[in-house]
Amino acid sequence: MDCKQAENLNTCNCTYDPCSRKGICCDCIRYHLRMRELPGCCFPDSAERTFDRSFEHFARLVTSNEV
């Protein structure tokens, strides 16, 4: 299977500009799970910009119906 990086970039909301994994979802997910985080695409734009990608932050957003 070929990577669809160019297509993925159309919906990638990651604001961390020097990220080498932008659009390479399999690498992004693997990296963030290893760090006990979720990738930015799991968060609304306003929450993604905080760079708090922790499971706990995501759970707070779910609890407050923001996700």
Image (cartoon, rainbow, N blue to C red):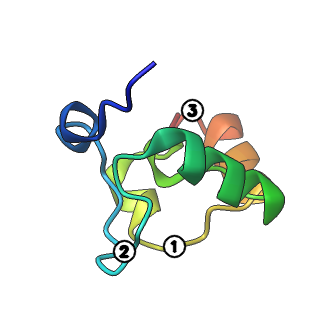
Which picture quadrant has residue 36? bottom right
Horizontal and vertical percent position of residue 9: 23, 44
Residue at the bottom extreme, as displayed: 18
**Residue indicated by mark 3:** 65
- Indicate left or right for 43 with 10 as reference: right
Residue at 68% x, 59% y: name it.
31
Q: What residue type is labelled 1?
A: Phe
- Indicate left or right for 20 with 10 as reference: right
Residue at 55% x, 52% y: name it.
28
Residues at marks 1 and 2, CA–CA distance in whole angstroms: 8 Å
**Crowd band around label 3 with a 10 angstrom C-alpha radius: few (<14), some (14–19), many (20+):** few
Horizontal and vertical percent position of residue 41: 44, 44
Residue at 51% x, 73% y: name it.
51
**Residue indicated by mark 2:** 16
Residues at marks 3 and 1, CA–CA distance in whole angstroms: 19 Å
- Figure check: 48 above or below 19: above
Residue at 53% x, 34% y: name it.
67
**Residue indicated by mark 1:** 51
- Indicate left or right for 62 with 20 as reference: right
Horizontal and vertical percent position of residue 39: 56, 51
- Figure check: 66 above or below 30: above
Which dot marks residue 14? none
Q: Pick the residue in front: 65 or 21.
A: 21
